[in-house]
Image (cartoon, rainbow, N blue to C red):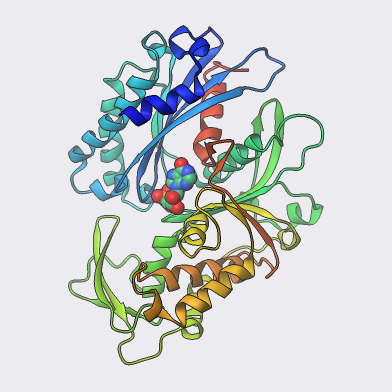
């Protein structure tokens, strides 16, 4: 609790304390119901005049695990979780602004993978919590987000935070998001060829800050890191086959364990008798990746911002610093994958999936999207202390649609 207060004071020096907030200060509350966890982002903005881009003053962030989809069979148990997160917003937003502060939850791949009926039951629980809160609850405030929006909104966030959406010389940067259940690629095409060769539903026009952006974006459902583990094990979409053991050359030879994902329990283990290591693992992973994704030629030569599990696994293997992030080449992931997979006994204190995860990331980048070995990836968790998450772009979009900002 005290942490929260301290954090707040950094952002609001006494003369700008939110309690004395001027009229041009407002808040937006965005829930991200991801496949592995639910997070709340409470943003504070100032807009000084219609000509100026919205100024972001700060963000309060909290998360809980597991994700919403883990409550698929007992939706009523979900309530505690959204109530707990919403309490943060009650503390953070000054009471006189509660009624003007919108609260929205958008669910991503975890819920997209559930049956319609189970997903709707979960969303209904959250809607009830929102309706009972003192905040502004817009129509359709709790929903499953379309995959193309997930990519676009993350792209808006990153390019806003790096200052690429204001002024004349806009050099926008593409974004790569690797979630638990889905993965997104988004960029602003520079080549006519990209517009021609892209499948129709990979191009979306989007209006933001008085500009229209025609973006290339796609969300690949089932290609998030955790879904990919199941696919590699051959266990994806296999509802709790009792006691069945899924084996892989990407796992430590003598490993046998259980894993829960999306409310289902899986048993998995290493190739006790057969091969293990990078080579056989890469072949196994290729089966899941090769020929499954569209490869826009234009991206081969460009650099991308990458976050979520790209970031987490790079941190786990000391490729980058947790606080600083860093710039990597695609081949750095391959080098690490080889190192970990060919020495699994040396990494046995880390996650048993480390080899599989790094190999998947390598194959996804190279064989999936078609990046070159020397393609640069800018790994970032935060820009100017704000999380690089689609939630900021979604909040801009929300405020714009409610007429709260210009
Ligand atoms: O606010 C955030 N900032 C940065 N990374 C986040 C944030 N929220 C979640 N992540 C990252 O997202 C990944 C998990 O994906 P998620 O649970 O959102 O699955 P999904 O996107 O497939 O639904 C993890 O790498 C986690 O660290
Ligand atoms: Ca996500």
Q: Is residue 90 above or below residue 307?
A: above
Farthest bottom residue in view: 273
Q: Residue at x 38, y 21 (%)?
A: 92
Q: Position of residue 158 (x, y in %)?
A: 61, 41
> Measured from the top left, where is residue 8 in percent x and y?
43, 24
Quadrant in which the C terminus is drawn: top right
Number of marks in the rendered image: 0
In this view, 261 is above or below 201: below
Residue 41 drawn at (x, y percent) = 43, 32
Q: What residue sits 30% from the left and 40% below the top?
A: 120
Left or right, 8 with respect to 56, comes to left
Q: Nearer the viewer, residue 19 or 202?
A: 19
Q: Nearer the viewer, residue 372 or 213?
A: 372
Q: Quarter of the image holding residue 163?
A: top right
Q: Residue at x 43, y 17 (%)?
A: 101
Q: Residue at x 51, y 41 (%)?
A: 389
In the picture, the quarter occupied by the N terminus is top left
Q: Is residue 288 visible?
A: yes
Q: Is residue 44 left or right of residue 109?
A: right
For residue 219, say whether it is visible.
no
From the viewer's perspective, is 376 left or right of 402? right
């Amino acid at each position: 609790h005290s942490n929260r207060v301290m954090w707040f004071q950094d952002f609001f020096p006494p003369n700008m304390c939110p309690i004395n907030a001027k009229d041009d200060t407002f808040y937006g509350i965005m829930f991200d119901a991801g496949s592995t966890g639910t997070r709340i982002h409470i943003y504070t903005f100032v807009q000084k005049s219609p000509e100026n881009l919205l100024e972001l003053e700060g963000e309060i962030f909290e998360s809980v695990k597991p994700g919403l989809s883990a409550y698929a069979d007992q939706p009523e148990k979900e309530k505690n979780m959204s109530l707990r997160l919403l309490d943060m917003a009650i503390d953070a937003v000054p009471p006189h602004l509660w009624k003007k502060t919108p609260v929205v939850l958008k669910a991503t791949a975890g819920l997209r993978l559930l049956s319609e009926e189970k997903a709707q039951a979960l969303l209904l629980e959250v809607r009830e919590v929102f309706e009972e809160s003192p905040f502004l609850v817009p129509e359709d405030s709790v929903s499953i987000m379309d995959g193309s929006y997930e990519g676009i909104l993350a792209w808006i966030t990153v390019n806003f935070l790096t200052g690429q959406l204001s002024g004349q010389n806009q050099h926008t940067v593409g974004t790569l998001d690797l979630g638990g259940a889905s993965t997104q690629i988004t960029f602003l095409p520079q080549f006519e060829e990209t517009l021609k060769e892209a499948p129709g539903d990979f191009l979306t026009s989007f209006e933001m800050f008085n500009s229209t952006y025609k973006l290339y974006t796609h969300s690949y459902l089932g290609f998030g890191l955790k879904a990919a583990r199941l696919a590699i094990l051959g266990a994806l979409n296999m509802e709790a086959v009792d006691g069945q053991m899924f084996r892989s050359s990407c796992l430590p030879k003598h490993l046998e364990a259980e894993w829960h994902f999306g409310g289902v329990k899986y048993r998995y283990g290493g190739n006790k008798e057969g091969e293990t290591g990078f080579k056989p693992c890469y072949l196994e992973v290729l089966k899941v990746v090769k020929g499954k994704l569209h490869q826009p030629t234009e991206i081969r030569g460009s650099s991308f911002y990458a976050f979520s599990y790209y970031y987490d696994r790079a941190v786990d293997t000391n490729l980058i610093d947790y606080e600083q992030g860093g710039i990597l080449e695609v081949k750095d992931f391959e080098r690490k994958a080889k190192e970990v997979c060919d020495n699994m006994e040396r990494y046995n204190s880390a996650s048993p999936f480390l080899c599989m995860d790094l190999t998947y990331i390598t194959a996804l980048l190279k064989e999936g999207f078609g990046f070159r070995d020397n393609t640069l990836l800018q790994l970032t968790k935060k820009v100017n202390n704000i999380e690089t998450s689609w939630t900021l772009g979604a909040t801009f979009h929300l405020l714009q649609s409610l007429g709260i900002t210009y």
